[in-house]
Image (cartoon, helix red, strand yellow):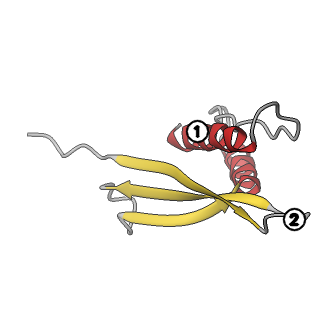
Amino acid sequence: RGFPQELTTVRVQDPRVQNEGSWNSYVDYKIFLHTNSKAFTAKTSCVRRRYREFVWLRRQLQKNAGLVPVPELPGKSTFFVGSTDEFIEKRRQGLQHFLEK
């Protein structure tokens, strides 16, 4: 019997508008991680992060990635046809896809 397979699950959930109605409103997302990997001391963690923090993370990954392609983030479109909820959901899906990659 081999070693148990290492599994890591990440979920981007629960988008929330912060400072709603003000000029500096933004959306943050709950990021939930569950793993059995020995590389992590905490087997579960949960934080809230906003889009600009994903942009920062992607830049850091690019600096250190060498020739390994870094996944794309969903677009930062300020012009969006459709509802805000729809945009937030599309972005949530894109952020989850980014973290899974």
Residue name at image x 24 percent, y 43 percent: 5
The residue beneath circle 2 is 24
Q: Which residue lies furthest to the right in this view?
A: 23
x, y percentage for residue 98?
Answer: 59, 40
Q: In which quarter of the image is residue 80?
A: top right
In the rendered structure, the answer to whether residue 52 lies left or right of residue 12 reads right
In this picture, residue 15 sits left or right of residue 40: right
Q: Which mark is residue 21?
A: none
State the image coordinates of residue 17 (x, y, percent, origin top left).
71, 60
Amino acid type, mark 2: Asn
Mark 1 or mark 2: whose residue is earlier in sequence: 2
Horizontally, residue 82 falls left or right of residue 71, namely: right
- Residue at the extreme left: 1
The residue identified by callout 1 is 93
- Dot 2, how many residues are within 10 Å of its Cα: few (below 14), some (14-19), or many (20+)? few
Give x and y (percent) for residue 15. Answer: 62, 55
Other-residue count near label 1 (Cα within 10 Å), few / some / many at <14 / 14–19 / ≥20: some
Q: Is residue 52 left or right of residue 36?
A: right
Looking at this view, is 19 or 59 the one in front?
19
Look at the numbered disc 1 and give the secondary structure of its residue: helix
Query: Disc 1 to disc 2, how far (Cα)?
Result: 23 Å
Disc 1 marks a residue whose amino acid type is: Gln
Residue found 30% across the figure and 55% down from its top: 36
Compare residues 98 and 66 and report the one nearer the observer: 98
- Corner quadrant of residue 91: top right
Residue 56, picture quadrant: bottom right
Task: Determine the secondary structure under disc 2.
Answer: loop
In the rendered view of the protein, which quadrant contains the N terminus?
Answer: top left
What residue is shown at x 45% (from left), y 49% (from top)? Answer: 10
